[in-house]
Amino acid sequence: MTIQRMDNVGIVVDDLEAAIAFFTELGMELEGDAQIEGIWADQTVGLDGVRSSIAMMRTPDGHGKLELTTFHTPASITAGPLNPPPNTLGLHRVMFAVDDIDDTITRLRRHGAELLGEVAQYENIYRLCYLRGPSGIIVALAERIG
């Protein structure tokens, strides 16, 4: 066997508290937080002098996790446009299944989320949308309707 499971997805954010609030509003739970530093951290990520704060968020079912990270040193850098479009190469979005897409959008807008397009319907199966959240993260929502 090559892997046991996907453990988490890491997302670097500029405002950890705002990101925690956003994903909490979405329905994720804060599993824990920690300060990360030391030689082992440097060796793991391939940077010198790593000092960061992390928050581990988990979905209510306990199977999905996001590791939100703010780097204190070295400082975070922007690799491209601040708010890259959905067709940018690399990891660009995280999708969540929700019960009520309209209610979820309303709640996330209070945390600065903006729709990238509009809520669309795929056949009689899903209502879908992309939102831009904290630090430019694209969050996709899917509400099963059929």
Image (spheres, rainbow, N blue to C red):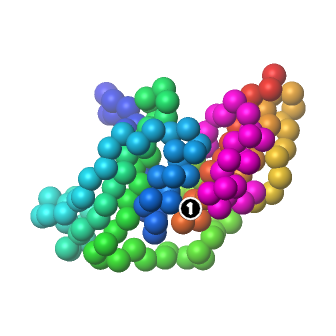
Residue 73 lies, in percent from the top left, at: 28, 75
Q: Which residues are magenta?
A: 95-115
| Image: 40 above or below 63 | below
Q: Quadrant of residue 81?
A: bottom right
Q: Quadrant of residue 142?
A: top right
User: Does the magenta segment cover residue 62?
Assistant: no
Residue at (31% x, 50% y) in the render = 33
Disc 1: which residue = 134
Residue at (49% x, 30% y) in the render = 60
Apparent side of residue 92 relative to residue 31 in the rendered image (left or right): right
User: Does the magenta segment cover residue 111?
Assistant: yes
| Image: 24 above or below 82 | above
Residue 40 lies, in percent from the top left, at: 14, 59
Is residue 82 in view from this perspective?
Answer: yes
Apparent side of residue 133 relative to residue 71 in the rendered image (left or right): right
The amino acid sitting under disc 1 is Pro
